Amino acid sequence: MAAAVAFAAVGGLAADNGGFFPTTWGWAAVGLCAVAVAALALGRVPRLRPLEMIVVGAVVALAAWTFASAIWSVSVTRSVLEGERSLVYVGGVVAALLLSRSLGGRAMVFGTWLAITAVCTYSVLTKLFPEEFGVVDSISGNRLSSPIGYWNGLALLAAIGCVLALGLAARGSAFVRAAASASLVLLVLTLYFTFGRGGWIALLAGCVAAIAVDRKRIQLVVTAAVAAPWPAIAVFAASRSGALTHVGPTAGAAEKDGHAVAVVSVVLLAVAAVAMLALDAVEERRQLSAGRRMRRVIAGVVAVAIAVLLVLVFARYGSPATIARHGWGSFTAGADTGPDLNNRLFRLSGTGRIDHWRVATREVEAHPWLGSGAGTFGQYWFQLRPSTVIVHDAHTIYLETLAELGPVGLGLLVLLLGALTVGAARSRSPLGAVVFGACIAYSLHAIADWDWELPALLVAIVFPAIGVVGEEEPEVAVAPARRRIVPAAAVFLVGSFALFTLLGNIALSRSSNASDATHWRQAESEARSALGLVPWSAEPARKLAVAQAGLGEITAARDSLRDAVDREPRDWSLWYQLAQVTTGSEHRHALAEATRLNPRRTSAEATPGDLRLVLIP
């Protein structure tokens, strides 16, 4: 049961664009809360350890603070939406906590690894068999991103899967060890085809962290040595394929090269499994343990290897100061690497992140204590951006959280991630070290990306981390009914609110789809339904205005947009849409506000439900 819940949560969110869209948050939060209520109904109320209390307290407090930020936010719509997303994390933590004690934490690690492997298998298939599974993505530029929808997010998911697979290959049954070893071929190929540098850094950091804290690190190192060559060979074979590693390949070339790499991968899958079975047989006869003398020898070898590596690096790239100077110059420079995507792996370009961070810093300066409200970075970006590039996130969880939720929000986020990480490190579970490594990979990757916006990624460490902490106490006595009523009622209320917002977001989505199909009456009806379900949001009024404009009811559309602007006066796109349905001084004022809030707006820049597509034949 625990493995099934972890598999469904991680796999379901990952398969649906990583859980990026509001409707996905809704069903995920409702489902996780339902699991938690069912567990409470069966009497599973574990006595929380201090670290578990910190995790629960941090995630609940962070969700509450996110919702509370709507009080002072510059965008109530965005802040409440971010609060809705946080309910997924609340439901995930509570469900994982209730299941880990009674059904076993190791099962959660297994379920999470299995879900990530399934997602990455599908992802690789879209690359190797484009004629059958190919996904057209004009933005990715031949970088693997499906089904997450964002290459760097997929890279992190694959990196987390790799670290968990290493642990299962070292500590599972013979069959699980073989399967985990084989899965590394697919997981590493997925990571490679994203051509993301951050994923590789996260994987390296996660593996080093796992080895550093593991109580049987020699056995873990030997397992890694046996498992690593096969995915490495797969990556080497893939890197030699021009159609799979260059921008804009022909369909025929991509199909031919994909099939060739697929054959190599299948062979390597089998070899990886057999190699791990052979290692398992050896370990059955002789335990791979190290005495004091062996540990000293290994430490000496590692020290010498590090020294040689440093000498080679300094000889090739110069002194540490020179490396730092060149690295910073590369990070702030442009990201043009030519058509060969392999070049990306050896460049340090931040692809514009320095500009994102500067805008986020100015947002912090404007709202140093409480932040500007959850989800509001995008509005500051449009107003302060130094170019016409469109982004909605600061590409760093920590600075963006500080900008939007202030020091309190940042402190709660760090507390949540820190408690999960420390709990895994202190766990006595055989898999505790690799889960610790997975937490390190997530926390490090989040420094330079928007991983929080993809719930699949955080849930992928929440279930394993809470699982290995709870594994120490596999049995939980049935609690009296009076101990279950309050927590069950609280979780039920959270799930009910999530269901309420889910219905509103579904109505908004249906309204958009109906407008795209020019079914204006249906679009209007769905927008009116959303008005009653999410009255704090400006989006129902926007959707209603689009439908009314499509029906030729310009006066009504104008009134709806005025209502939307009253709710979100800092949203440039609403002002721009209002300018499209007004004349005279009101038109000039609306256009001036749109320009003030987005000074670098281009004529081709689209707005949500752009009225130009409705009003101009």
Image: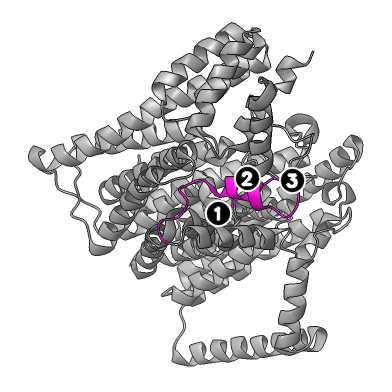
Q: Quadrant of residue 325?
A: bottom right
Q: Is residue 455 shown above or below 136?
A: below
Q: CA distance from mark 1 to mark 3?
A: 41 Å
Magenta region includes residue 389: yes
Quadrant of the frame with the C terminus = top right
Q: Position of residue 6 (x, y in %)?
A: 42, 43
Q: Quadrant of residue 91?
A: top left
Q: Which residue corresponds to the image point at 79% horizontal and 34% vertical from the top-left? A: 604
Q: Position of residue 483 (x, y in %)?
A: 11, 43
Q: Secondary structure at mark 2?
A: helix
Q: Which residue corresponds to the image point at 71% horizontal and 16% vertical from the top-left? A: 614
Q: Which residue is mark 2?
A: 120
Q: Is residue 617 shown above or below 42?
A: above
Q: Position of residue 571 (x, y in %)?
A: 58, 37
Judged left or right of residue 561, residue 229 is: right
Q: Are marks 3 and 2 in contact (CB under 8 Å)?
A: no
